[in-house]
Amino acid sequence: MSTILTAARALTSQGIVENPILTLEDGRIAHISTRESSETRAGAKHFPNATITPALFDVHLHGAANHDVMEGNPTALSAVASFLATRGVGQFLPTTVTAPIDATLQALDGLADIIEAPAQPGQARPVGIHLEGPFVSHSKRGVHAANLIQAPSVNLFDRFYEASRGHIRLLTIAPEEPGAMDVIRRAVEKGVRVSIGHSNATLAETDAAIAAGAVSATHTFNAMRALDHREPGVLGAVLDRDVLFAELICDGVHVAPELVRLWLKAKGPHRGILVTDGISATGMPEGTYVLGDFEVTVANGRATARGVLAGSVLTLDKAIENVRAFTGTSLATAVGLASTNPATMLGLDAPVIAEGQPANLNLFTEEGKLLATCLAGTFLA
């Protein structure tokens, strides 16, 4: 059985197509054609003012729907993945937080089971793990528990990697910590992408990490040494070095709109990555929730613990709407920041709209409001 989808335009692998007709069959895009602007198709799902885009990819996500990924069990991840799908996300990296070593090992093992299980209908798919912590700086730890931070260690990284059965795809690390360069090189050797974050690194220490293989920066501006005109530090390197990708939490809480604009000017449309850093409170009423094994209070759109920000309740579709509003960038660029760029950073095939590709699609208004999501050819209710 096929589904016909029409809209005002589509962001395809060949560029913007006006008045597209997409035929979806067996979970894939079987055919793309065009129509006259006034033409309608009987039985088609028609979105006259919408743009069809690829589904989104969140590479920094701790939880949602009252569940934390550190639970590491199918019930928790199913709830998270189902919620993410309703917000336009097709793929994600469940992201750990600094915790006791045994708890991290257990979570990684459980997450590996879920990643290796068959894809579930109507759910975003976890395609790897983002290991955030325990190799972070004490001075820029944010909400990470000081007593659980570990000195960077190749042996400990190897234990984590083995527990994940090779599914760690992204590692956040503070490169100035003793032993960090050895861990970065080890991670790169294993095919893991390295992101500089929770770091008080100098410019020289950051450049050393880049030379060792680091390719990205974790939630730019947050939990980083402040910019100084004589010691640019990690933030100066992130904004200036074209080789680095750079995450950003675009919720209007973590980063002021002026600096969102600076970030996009510095990184351009191909190196910026929108993330949520979402926690278990995402999609829930305000109240008290958990991140790892500690409590987080959510009030007035802010998640805090121990007196500092503790992740966010942002959704990735809202990040697209926000970046459009803050910067005036095009919808195509905004979507690329949350789909193409994270996949490229990880060395994965980017989600695209093309014949033969999976029918994992979103429909957005020009302002960036999500109207509908289709995963594996099925529209979510």
Image (cartoon, rainbow, N blue to C red):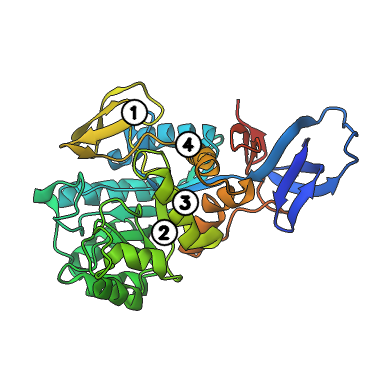
Please give left or right for residue 274 compared with residue 164 in the image. right
User: Could you tell me the amino acid type at mark 1?
Assistant: Asn
Instruction: Give the label on residue 261, or none.
Output: 3
Q: Nearer the viewer, mark 2 or mark 3?
A: 3
Q: Secondary structure at mark 1?
A: loop
Q: Position of residue 175 (x, y in %)?
A: 24, 68
User: Could you tell me the amino acid type at mark 3?
Assistant: Arg
| Residue bearing mark 2 | 246
Q: Nearer the viewer, mark 2 or mark 1?
A: 2
Q: Nearer the viewer, mark 3 or mark 4?
A: 3
Q: Position of residue 285 (x, y in %)?
A: 36, 21
Placement of the N terminus among the 4 image quadrants: top right
User: Could you tell me the amino acid type at mark 2?
Assistant: Ala
Which of the two labelled residues, at mark 2 and mark 3, occupies the earlier sequence position?
A: 2
Instruction: Give the label on residue 66, or none.
Output: 1
Q: Secondary structure at mark 2?
A: strand
Tell me, yes or no, if residue 116 can be seen here: no
| Residue bearing mark 4 | 84
